[in-house]
Image: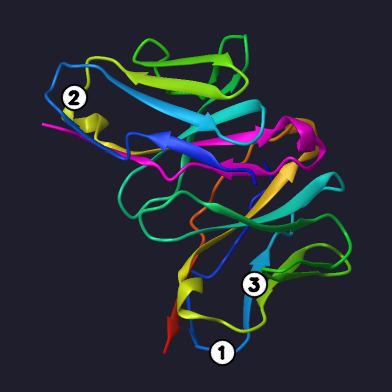
Amino acid sequence: GAVVSQHPSRVICKSGTSVKIECRSLDFQATTMFWYRQFPKQSLMLMATSNEGSKATYEQGVEKDKFLINHASLTLSTLTVTSAHPEDSSFYICSAIDRGRFAKNIQYFGAGTRLSVL
Amino acid sequence: DAKTTQPNSMESNEEEPVHLPCNHSTISGTDYIHWYRQLPSQGPEYVIHGLTSNVNNRMASLAIAEDRKSSTLILHRATLRDAAVYYCILRRETSGSRLTFGEGTQLTVNP
């Protein structure tokens, strides 16, 4: 149980294009979803927190107009990297909290999306 | 968030126990101790968490010092699949589910 699916696993795009990454909780309803970014040989950095039906809360230094987050349902959150540039190349990872087990506050992570911007 | 300190790397031999230490001297009474691990090129995976008492699950054991200023994640019999970066994270109850990842410990398991 508690499976989070992230799609695509890898994407290569041209500079200036937008890329959408999907994060789905497959067997549970997610109260809250998180988006992280991880550069090579570095730790995960939290980008934003999204709650179903409300606006995402972005961490300091993360441009909300560049990284658009939509959490339209209890099982789906999307991250759109708008006008991507080479410096946006990174490993993007989502996670979700199981609504039914919210009290445990355990995050279940997707497998990540490796974005390469040429 | 209270800070944790972990060794950058550790080595172990297959089928031997592994003790991964974590120092958190500024922990507060409402901070939970969470452990996650990340295998290469994958998202992190929850391992275990606790507040004051030692905890066991099918993956590992968590030993928490009496003063809570340190904890140890115990893998009872390391396998090659346990090679990963292990993160010790303090989660403050008032911050909800938010986690702040540090650098973690890179565990190498030798065959």
Residue designated by label 2: A85
Instruction: Name the image quarter holding residue B57.
Output: bottom right
Residue B75 x %, y %:
64, 77
Identify residue for label 1: B15
**Chain letter belonging to callout 2:** A
Q: Amino acid at mark 1?
A: Glu
Instruction: Check residue B21 in the rendering and tell me which mark sits there, or answer none.
Output: 3
In three-dimensional space, the C-alpha distance between marks 2 and 1, rounded to whole angstroms, equals: 45 Å
Closer mark to the observer between disc 2 and disc 1: 1
Q: Which mark is residue A67?
A: none
- The answer to whether the residue labelled 2 contacts the one labelled 3, judged by CB atoms less than 8 Å apart, is no
Residue A107 covered by magenta stretch: yes
Q: Give the residue type at disc 2.
A: His
- Please state the horizontal and vertical placement of residue B13, each as a whole percent of the image: 49, 90
Between the residue at mark 1 and the residue at mark 3, the CA separation in whole angstroms equals 19 Å
What range of the chain is rendered magenta? A94-118
Question: Residue at the spot x=41%, y=90% of the render?
Answer: B111
Mark 1 and mark 3 on one chain: yes
Count residues near mark 2 (Cα–Cα under 10 Å), then give few for <14, some for 14-19, many for 20+.
Answer: some
Q: Secondary structure at mark 2?
A: loop
Is residue A84 depicted above or below B9 in this figure? above
Q: Does residue B14 lie above or below B36 as drawn?
A: below
Residue B60 falls left or right of residue A57: right
Left or right: where B111 falls relative to B31: left
Label 1 secondary element: loop
Q: Residue at x 78, y 38 (%)?
A: A101
User: What residue lies at 33% left-to-right and 55% top-to-bottom?
Assistant: A41
